[in-house]
Amino acid sequence: MRKCAFLLMLSLLCLTAGSTLRAQDRVEAIRKVLLNPETDQVLVVAHRAYWRSNAPENSLAAIDSAIQLKMDMVELDVWRTKDHHLVLMHDPTVDRTTDGKGRIADMTLAEIKQLRLKDKDGRLTSHRVPTLREALLLAKGKIMINLDKAYGFFAEVYPLLEETGTTRQIVMKGNAPAAKVKQDFGQYLDKVIYMPIVSMDGNDVDQMIADYLAVLHPVAFEITFSKGKEPVCLRTLEQLKGKSLPWYNSMWVGLSGEYTDDAALKDPEAVYGYLVKQLGARLIQTDRPVELLDYLRGQGRHE
């Protein structure tokens, strides 16, 4: 009897170890694409996680949905509470996404944990505001994470990454000049992935990118542009060739001209096809990750 119990326990341990290994393999497979400047695969980034699954944005359920559907990265927004806990929410206030009111910076974690999150239609759910630690533990080994709004207090974020063993999954972004990033963020540049954000509508775009390439050697750039700036994107694509991957955002006009998720619902080739085939997108952040995945798989650009 004891032998049977021992064998059963051993089998369960093996299954758990195998599951953990497969999860880690998933993250490493995503990193392999992200770190390859010659890749033709396209990574899918779920904006505020996959909230169209009826899970609230920036919720644990939305992160889990993205994991289950084999998305590559979730973009999560981080704010700090009055008592210096890190929580997920897009806005600086809880008004839009919960049944509460007030600024996150003026509330304690205990107060925020009493709130219920709303879904995409504004209906209250049973979901609660997650802490960053809870999100990291859920995502560990399963999906990459882009932490937005965390640049200013990354010194408080990083110990959580170390504690949870998730440093290899993290992408940080910002639009500060290269020298400023090196000064502020230098001690973390060999620990997490840093990605510059560059607007094609700005001045001295070529020089800014050249500075980033020389100082930071980023694996990718987030590129934003308004309608009519596509020729600048093409010039930038040549500048990045063989060095860094282009990241585009298809959520709304102003980030990628007319190439938006809403337009892609009518003609995915005209939107996603243009971003990938003409502008060289190798990461796309989207509010329609399922539709984007379907398109990319049909093109042989995603597993």
Image (tube, rainbow, N blue to C red):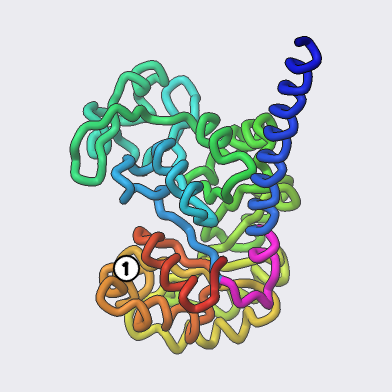
In this picture, residue 157 sits left or right of residue 215: left
In this picture, residue 217 sits left or right of residue 70: right
Residue at label 1? Answer: 261
Query: Residue 21: horizontal and vertical position, in percent?
Result: 72, 43
Q: Nearer the viewer, residue 8 or 203?
A: 8
**Image quadrant where one finds the N terminus:** top right
Query: Residue 226: horizontal and vertical position, in percent?
Result: 35, 76
Query: Residue 263: horizontal and vertical position, in percent?
Result: 27, 74
**Image quadrant where one finds the C terminus:** bottom right
Q: Give the magenta part as a residue range.
A: 31-41
Q: Nearer the viewer, residue 12 or 44?
A: 12
Residue 19 among magenta residues: no
The residue positioned 47% from the left and 72% from the top of the image is 296
The residue positioned 34% from the left and 38% from the top of the image is 92
Give above or below for 190 relative to 231: above
Q: Amino acid at mark 1?
A: Asp
* Residue at disc 1, secondary structure: helix
In this picture, residue 212 sits left or right of residue 99: right
Query: Residue 169: horizontal and vertical position, in percent?
Result: 63, 48
Label 1 packing within 10 angstroms: few (<14), some (14-19), many (20+): many
The residue positioned 74% from the left and 33% from the top of the image is 14
Prevailing secondary structure of the magenta residues: loop
